[in-house]
Amino acid sequence: MAATGPEHRARITLVGKPGCHLCDDARAVVSRVAEELGVTWEEWSIADDPALAEEYWEQIPVTFVDGRQHDYWRVDEARLRAALGAGR
C-alpha cells in the first residue's frame, strides 16, 4: 500500500464492504462517472484485507483518485468529476 492510499492501477478506487448502503450509493456514482468519462475504476473490500479494514473501517466508503484519498462516507459527483479533470 502506498503512503497516500491504495496503490493505484485504476483512476478511481472505491474501498467499501458488502452490505454497506453508503458503499452501494458510492458505487453507483463512481460507476456512472467512470463510464461517462471513460476512466477505469476498481473496488476493494475491507472484508478481504485486514490492513484496509484497520485503516479505513470507520470511513467507508472511501474513494481514491489516482492513488490519493479523495472522499469518504459519501461521494459528491461534481467533486469527483472535478478531481478527474472533467468538472460539469
Image (tube, grey):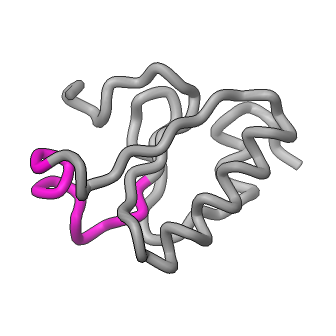
- Residue at position x 80%, y 28% in the image: 38
Residue 27 colored magenta?
Answer: no
From the viewer's side, name the closer residue of 50 and 3: 50
Please name whichever residue, 10 or 17, is drawn nearer the observer in this view of the structure: 17
Q: Is residue 26 left or right of residue 15?
A: right
Quadrant of residue 19 in the image? bottom left
x, y percentage for residue 85?
A: 74, 32
The boundaries of the magenta stretch are 50-62
In the depicted structure, whether residue 72 falls above or below residue 34: below
60 magenta-colored: yes
Instruction: Work out which residue is located at the far top of the displayed protein and give it.
Output: 9
In the image shown, does 77 or 34 lie closer to the viewer?
34
Q: Return the x and y of residue 4 as percentages of the image width and height.
A: 27, 33
Q: Residue at x 64, y 39 (%)?
A: 83
Q: Residue furthest bottom?
A: 21
Left or right placement of residue 65 versus residue 76 in this view: left
Task: Establish if 69 lies above or below 73.
Answer: above
Residue found 20% across the figure and 48% down from its top: 52
Q: What is the quadrant of residue 61 in the picture? A: bottom left
Image location of residue 34, percent across then percent down: 73, 39
Image quarter (top left, top right, bottom left or bottom right) of the N terminus: top left
Q: How many numbered marks appear?
A: 0
Q: Is residue 42 left or right of residue 33?
A: left
* Residue 78, position as x, y percentages in the image: 75, 56
18 above or below 1? below
